Image (cartoon, grey):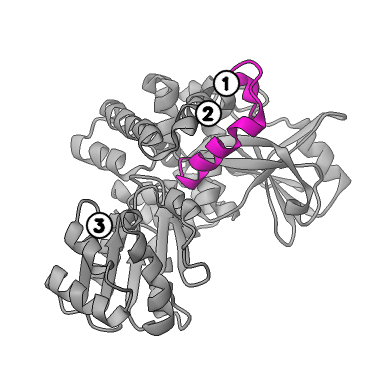
Amino acid sequence: MYRDKIKDLIKWKNSSRRKPLVLSGARQVGKTWLLKEFGNKEYESVAYVNFYGNSPAKDIFELDLNPERIINALEVLCNTKIEKEKTLIILDEIQDCKNALASLKNFCEEAPEYHIAVAGSLLGISLHDEASFPVGKVNSMFLYPLSFCEFIRAIGKDKLADALETESFENLASFHATLMDDLKNYLIIGGMPAVVQNYLEEDNILQVRAVQQQIISDYIRDFSKHAHRTQAAKIWEIFNVISSELAKENKKFLFSMIKKGARAAEYEEALLWLEDAGIASRVRRVKALRHPLSAYLELDAFKLFLADVGLLGALAGLDIQIILRDNDLFTEFKGALAEQFVFQELKAKEARPFYYHKDKPEREIDFLLDGAKLTIIEVKSGKNLASKSLTEIVKESSDEKAYKLSILPYQENETITNLPIYLAGRLV
């Protein structure tokens, strides 16, 4: 499967300021595959080391952290000649070898001519907890599930994907029905590579839920295996209510949905764990529509999204047939799939979205992006595009670009642009 992130990896390879690379992301988003694919296409050779259950590999980093000695030992272990600038060294499951993680500082300072990329399961957790992490001595990237456009390429529609990325909104109108059909499939399948691969191999969309449930089971198993014992139950409790929280009319995350009397302070560490693991992400609320949005955060108010829309449907037990029915595409589940999809598309483009809510007068904006002008995004789950909040806000200020995302085709208006929801990624 083609991943857009490979463009960033090529830039990293060619950068004069290149440092060892740390590739993070949720379990099973394809980090190992991507690094191997990148190495095979862009380098003369690849030296791959997986530290999981690999004592000989770990022993290499026990003696000292001298780069030249380590390189010599890795050549023997991998049976590969490691050449400066020509070989990509991949250190996988690096969280299982703390000394290997610490060695990145030495490679950055003493041997920058070696190209090293590291990845691992729950690497975000390990980096968060690791006091000896080489701060300032590495480059970092984050890999997300396949975006909608990457999914279109994966199912063999490269030309349509090219059009989705480059064609004007007007020109895409002729592909609207096709793209909406593909979007329905994406909302069910999502962007986890194993699920997409299962769909491609079996050509049966009804079977993908079993793969998704396995991934969810793996995540839950990680809670007890890798989290502190006192936090594992809290992590599971938050994870278990994400879908029901998003199904509310007001999608602000309420700890009282977990259990009566639950407080934010007792769950903050569990929330951080889910974020560090790449499994869930908070979208923070702002109290004013002003630049920069980050200066107007309300730290106790946020919406919580899952990493993948397909996993959200599986976690909620949403019937696949409901999504496949035309009229019920986004109206079921109270628009949760629509907002999850838009969130996912924005994050895939490295955006940092916020949202806005005000009680008096009552106004709410689903997503906000900072920039030269604020980008205001309203997500409509049905065909009714009426939005009093958005209309009033646009009347009050000209310092915004306003969009309504829905299942309807593109329509340019004087102040608010109506876009089909599958174009969410083009707003970044």
The front one of 82 and 360 is: 82
Q: Quadrant of residue 277?
A: top left
Question: Disc 1 residue type?
Answer: Ile
Q: Return the mark for residue 238.
A: 2
Q: Is residue 255 magenta?
A: yes
The CA distance from mark 2 to mark 3 is 31 Å
Q: Earlier in the sequence, mark 1 or mark 2?
A: 2
For label 3, the SS is: loop
Q: Quadrant of residue 54?
A: bottom left
Is residue 119 shown left or right of residue 273?
left
The front one of 53 and 158 is: 53
Which region is colored magenta?
Answer: 253-279
Locate residue 227, reporting x and y percent.
43, 38
Question: Disc 3 residue type?
Answer: Phe
Question: Which residue shows up at 63% across the image and 22% down it?
Answer: 262
The residue that label 1 is drawn on is 258
The front one of 336 and 326 is: 336
- Relative to residue 168, is residue 419 depicted above or below? above
For label 1, the SS is: loop
The front one of 378 and 37 is: 37
The CA distance from mark 3 to mark 1 is 37 Å
Neighbours of disc 2 within 10 Å: few (<14), some (14-19), many (20+): many
CB-based contact (under 8 Å), mark 1 and mark 2: yes
Q: Return the mark for residue 350.
A: none
The residue that label 3 is drawn on is 51
Locate residue 212, reporting x and y percent.
33, 32
Q: Is residue 371 magenta?
A: no
For label 2, the SS is: helix
Question: Which residue shows up at 33% across the image and 29% down it?
Answer: 217
